[in-house]
Amino acid sequence: FTSTRDSGKISKMFSKRANTFLGEPEFLLSCLSRCGQDSFDKISNKEGFVNLGTAVNSLCEDVIKERFDKGDLFSHEASWQHYVGLNGTEDLLTVVAQFLSDRMAQSVSISPSNIRLVNGVSAGLEVLSWILADPGEVVLVPVPTYARFFADMNERMKTQVVGIHLRETPSSMFTLTPELLEEEILTQHQLGKSVKGFIFCNPNNPLGVVYPKTLTLGLMEVCKKYKVHFISDEIYGLSVFDPSVRFESVLSIPKDQIPDPERTHFMWGMSKDFGLAGFRMGFIHSYNKDMIKCLDGMMIYTSVSVHIQQFVSKMLQDTAWLDQIYFPANISRLSSSYSYVEKRFSD
């Protein structure tokens, strides 16, 4: 079987779009597969790979297994065998709205009507790319960043994701400011490009920076000025382990205080804070009713198993387990792991 790059035969057999996946594989997914097939083990495979390119939270696998093994989270109803809850069941969206209200929105009450379920935040990024930008239009993201931001929005939707190179200041090697965002928007305009979105990853991957609300609002003001959609990826929002650092979600900003609520969208999922990447569950919150309508229109392509939805719904309602067992263990182990790695690198 020959690739497009070898002979050009494949492009005649398939669409030009297919060439995206017939050439050199995207490096993160390629390395993920290679590491999975030949993983390091200190006893049986000392020459194997350690994957430093994929953020997998495996610190609480034992805690998760113990809870799941109780057997009270899974159930079945006949209706779940059919086309139900393609954009999130009513039960799940209600539970998630309350969960986010309690743990990320502070005094702001989140409505289930503003939330939709998609099959992972990566899928959510692709969906937003399709809704917000036509092929060739620009979405900006500060770099260094999570590498898949580029692929998630470009591989199939052909949105041009452009990195904003953060600048060194006396306080940090990588500083993000509203002025820097505005400068890049104007640069893209000079190049004849239309800037449709800005990805704000907070807490930041890979820098680990937790940005203050003052900066968030400043960046939002710039986005409002140039009619750019503000996409807040907060997939690590419940994994901040430093007690001296306060994470403030965009959900905690009342709607009437958001500079442009119609162009402000929030993303979160189960992959990082719970280490449940295999569940493929991501959530998008938006005050824009047309955004919700578009998400509903695409739901058959982004749906999640109803049984998994009900499983997670019950888990998120177990506040005693969350507050007394899971989150304390996760935060403690994140802190210990960070201290260990920092010390090893410093020695």
Image (cartoon, rainbow, N blue to C red):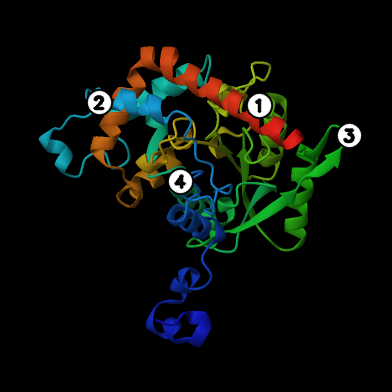
Q: CA distance from mark 3 to mark 1?
A: 25 Å
Q: Which mark is residue 124?
A: 4
In percent of width and height, residue 88 lies at 31, 36
Query: Mark 4 vs mark 2: which is more N-terminal?
Result: 2
Q: Amino acid at mark 2?
A: Leu
Give the alpha-carbon distance from disc 4 to disc 3, as whole Å. 36 Å
Which disc number belongs to residue 73? 2
Circle 1: is it few (<14), some (14-19), or many (20+) Cα within 10 Å?
few
C-alpha gap between disc 4 and disc 1: 33 Å
Q: Earlier in the sequence, mark 4 or mark 1?
A: 4
Q: Earlier in the sequence, mark 2 or mark 1?
A: 2
Residue at the image position 86 percent from the left and 37 percent from the top: 169
Residue 4 in the image: above or below residue 205: below
Q: Name the amino acid, label 4.
A: Gly
Q: Please, which residue is most extreme toward the front here?
A: 43
Residue mark closest to the camera, 4 vs 3: 3
- Circle 3 sits on which residue? 170
Nearer to us of marks 3 and 1 is 1
Question: Could you tell me the amino acid type at mark 3?
Answer: Pro
Disc nearer the start of the sequence (3/2): 2
Q: Dot 2: few (<14), some (14–19), or many (≥20) neighbours within 10 Å?
A: some
Q: Is residue 222 above or below residue 29?
A: above
Q: Residue at x 67, y 20 (%)?
A: 245
User: In 3D space, how far apart are the residues under numbered discs 2 and 1 (Cα atoms)?
Assistant: 34 Å
Residue 240 visible in image: no
Between the residue at mark 3 and the residue at mark 2, the CA separation in whole angstroms equals: 51 Å
Closer mark to the observer between disc 4 and disc 2: 2
Q: Is residue 328 above or below residue 49?
A: above
Horizontal side of 61 relative to 143 (left or right) equals left
